[in-house]
Image: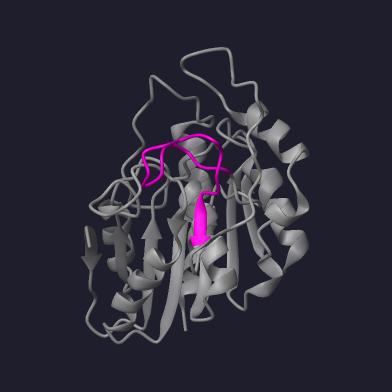
Amino acid sequence: MDRHMAVVQGAEAGVLVLAGSSGRIDADRCDVLARHGVTAMSMRWFGGPGQPPGICEVPLETFVAGLDLLAGTGVSRLAVLGVSKGAEAALTLACLEPRVDAVIALSPSSVVWANVGPGLDGAAHPQRSSWTWRGEPLPFAPYPAEWPDHGPPTSFRAFYERGLAAAPPEAAIPLERTRADVVLVAGADDQMWPSLTFAGALARRREARVVSHPAAGHRPRLPGEPPAQPSPSYLYGGSAAADAALGASAWPHILAALSP
């Protein structure tokens, strides 16, 4: 398994850290969490050996294997922290895996979306679910036919808003099924997708702590993390200061959710 693990001796909480559609292993975030007494692991969940090259029918059992490794370190509380597509995965996993005690979703989605890129068969079309569970694809919201016709850099917010308006009810992430503590972190200026709208929809399904900032974008920054690099391809919204302010506001709620 391609991963980065920061093991803290005697840690009571273990957190699986899931990056978004970059596909990267989020070592910086793991190390920040470890400095606060949490055993943290980030893993590659697509694009690696034996994995789909895109976010296409990714088995959620991939993340169960990560939880198994964390549980093996002796922690008494298991959590999943994800951002963007990683948050979509984290929330969905928490609805299916009863061992998840806390889920922290940064810039979340409230629905399962169609694939981003190809599956194991090398095909990206027709649209399929991003995730599977026990060999079956999860119901998903398809993308609109009209892709953004501006940029780069490109904002996908209106694109996802159109997709959300047409999403089938069964694509909604059934957050009411989880027993986990839920923290949702969203910036109102998110230009990748409407994460604050998504967070509101999730909170209507189940009690959750929603932390927001009116000027933050898609990439909230937790205390101690390096700033995100500008992108020539995508508009994420927010600013370095607002994204850091959102992360700072969310930080005590994240630590509380990780506390046994």
Residue 211's place in the image compared with 79, above or below, is above
Q: Is residue 227 left or right of residue 211?
A: left
Q: Residue furthest front?
A: 121
Residue visible at 22% across and 81% down in the picture: 9
Q: Is residue 128 left or right of residue 75?
A: right
Counting every numbered tag in the picture gives 0
Question: Is residue 126 located in the magenta-colored stretch of the structure?
Answer: yes
Front residue of 13 and 178:
178
Residue 184's place in the image compared with 186, above or below, is below
Front residue of 246 and 78:
78
Q: Position of residue 134 (x, y in %)?
A: 49, 69
Question: Is residue 196 located in the magenta-colored stretch of the structure?
Answer: no
Q: Position of residue 139 (x, y in %)?
A: 64, 54
Q: Is residue 21 left or right of residue 158?
A: left
The overriding secondary structure of the stretch rendered in magenta is: loop
Q: Position of residue 230 (x, y in %)?
A: 37, 26
Can you tell which quarter of the image residue 94 is in? bottom right
Q: Where does the N terminus fall, quadrant-wise?
A: bottom left
Can you tell which quarter of the image residue 21 is in? top left
Question: Start and end of the magenta stretch?
Answer: 114-132
Residue visible at 54% across and 29% down in the picture: 237
Residue 102's place in the image compared with 130, above or below, is below
Can you tell which quarter of the image residue 162 is in? top right
